[in-house]
Image (cartoon, coloured by chain):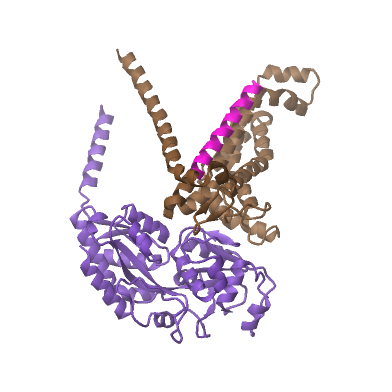
Chain colours: A brown, B purple
Amino acid sequence: MTDKIFKQLLFVLSLIVLFITAGMIYSLVSGSLPALREFGIFHFISSSEWDPKAENYGALPFIVGTLLTSFLALLISLPFSLSIALFTGEYYKNSRFSRIISSFVNLLSGVPSIVYGLWGFYSIRPIIINMGISSNGLGILTSSIVLAIMIIPYASSLSSEFLGMVPANLKEASYSLGSTRLEMIRNVMIPYASSGVTASYILALGRALGETMAVTMLIGNTNNLPSSLIATGNSMASIIANQFGEADGLKLSSLIAIALLLMLITAFINLIGKLIIRRFQ
Amino acid sequence: MKKINYFIIAVVVIFITSCTNNQVKLNAAGATFPLPYYNLAFSTYKNLNAINISYGGIGSGGGIRSLKDKVVNFAGTDAYLSDKELAEMPSEVLHIPTCMGAVVMAFNLDNIENLNITPSIISDIYHGKISNWNDTAIAAINPNIKLPDLKITPVYRSDGSGTTFVFSDYMTKTSQEWKVDFGHGKSLKWKLGIAAKGNPGVAGVIKQTRGSIGYIGTEYAFAQDIKTAAIQNPRGEFIKATTKSIALAAEGDIRPDTRQMITASTTKGSYPISCFTWIIFYKDLSIACKDQQTQIETLKLLNWMLSDKAQELTLKVNYVPLPPLAIQAGLKILSTAK
């Protein structure tokens, strides 16, 4: 009897999660309808106007800002996270040294976003100014660098797990055919673990897409299309964080529309990730 | 069995201790401009009357929205509600001024203590027409200072701000170009520069960026030791923000509903970007205050804010007490609240 009740309970709880997700999508869609009706979906996505006085809003600068910072962060973090993953998953697997490295990297993942923003503002920003790259040190590049550091733990710890799961007999078979370690990694380990490694990078990208506070503090908060990597801009999450508190009417609806777009972009990238993983399997 | 007992005892204790907290707590939110003063005033009030008041500095726009959503008992704003905005509120909203302050042009330049600046230069800086500190226009009114060859970085607010409202009100009155391109309001369509959230955000960026200039409340400039410019008032005098120069800007009559901008005052010696800051609340207090006790305490607090004791506190944080006419108008308004 209790078996049956337990099964029903699990069923109900799962349904609740589904309802919450559906409810969230519904409230986002209904909140953004006024703005989408006023501007039209395509015009809203392609317009770079953000004029509070003329009540003319467009989401393009923010979409570009989010995608640019997230993909650039992924690119910057790639060499570091891959190195850490290979280090802990293959070269120094199961050694004390790799456990220490893993703990430090996991520590990085626990640091709150706003602490990263503060640290980036007081540490990375002066470096960028002193190197002469940018006069005010804020912008797409600075936020991408800090975002990259934030997502390294996500990418590296998961890929390290997957790389560690490559069966030893496959590796040894490769060695017995005369391959060097590097060749073995390139031709056996990475193809074998590719779906897992891709999944971990998609996870890291997902984190970068939604990151708010660190980006708000470092991106300059200007509502324009970034003209270069050192230009300031804005991301979808940071415009919402900045202007949500006082937004009303059409502006509020535009911000909710941007939130909906962010959700759709994240879902889309997760979908692409799943397709890539399936192709590799 | 023992563990369950401890758990139950813990739950019961937590329940009891949270239930006996009958102390009235007031919730407010709004402008970051008067935040230093409100923090001091509210903590002083707490020591006198044991009432906890929490004030969230989320910007004037945020405060107005919170009052509209009825999630706060009262709100702080440096931008009074326009007739249109008043009509959009669920019920009649009253304004009382709480203190006077000034918006200063804070800048970050090495070895330069004093800088003269005019509204047309400010407008050109935010338009990008003047992009370097050694521009002839700035040098012309600062003959005794050696200005560096350094790019100017204008800073502004990224959120809906009463400070922006006051600053843009002054600029609209004094620069035709600003009036046409930017206008005045809590959020503007800026052309260039960098933005930060809240007065503290802008102050932080100015402090950390060489060659930057931006508009912030006086207390933020003093607290962070950021230098401020002397601005040319409508009489042609270059005035810095001091208690005296700010008080001079409020000379004259006050509107009965106290919704008045005092920027660009023509009084001799007045600081041109002075302003009142208001607390707004519903005339029918029961709309935003759930129970009788909260309504009484809110009214008591607001009356106290206009008292001598509270007004004296303004000087401690580099703000300015209200002129007698403003206090009278405020008290009159409070007497109509229910």
Left or right of A30 in this view: A96: right
- Outermost residue to the bottom: B268
Residue at left 29%, top 74%?
B256
Question: Where B192 sits versus A26, above or below?
Answer: below
Residue at left 44%, top 80%?
B265
Residue in the foreground of this view, choosing between A234 and B229: A234
Left or right of B331 in this view: B87: right
- Outermost residue to the left: B292
**Residue B221 image offset from top left, x and y in percent:** 49, 71
Residue in the foreground of this view, choosing between B335 and A50: A50
Q: Inspect the magenta stretch and tell me whether residue B20 lies in it.
A: no
Left or right of B128 in this view: A34: left
- Is residue A165 something that shows in the picture? no
Residue at left 55%, top 68%?
B180
Residue in the foreground of this view, choosing between B312 and B83: B83
Helix, strand or loop: magenta stretch: helix
Question: Where A261 sits versus B260, above or below?
Answer: above
Image quadrant in which the C terminus of chain A is located: top right
**Image-quadrant location for residue B15:** top left
**Residue A205 image offset from top left, x and y in percent:** 59, 38
Look at the image and give the residue range highlighted in magenta: A257-281
Image quadrant in which the N terminus of chain A is located: top left
**Residue B253 image offset from top left, x and y in percent:** 33, 80
**Residue B263 image offset from top left, x and y in percent:** 45, 76
Left or right of B330 in this view: A115: right
Residue in the foreground of this view, choosing between B83 and B188: B83
Question: Where B334 sits versus B235, above or below?
Answer: above
Residue at left 69%, top 26%?
A190
- Is residue A169 something that shows in the picture? yes
**Image-quadrant location for residue B88:** bottom left
Q: Inspect the magenta stretch and tell me whether residue A273 lies in it.
A: yes
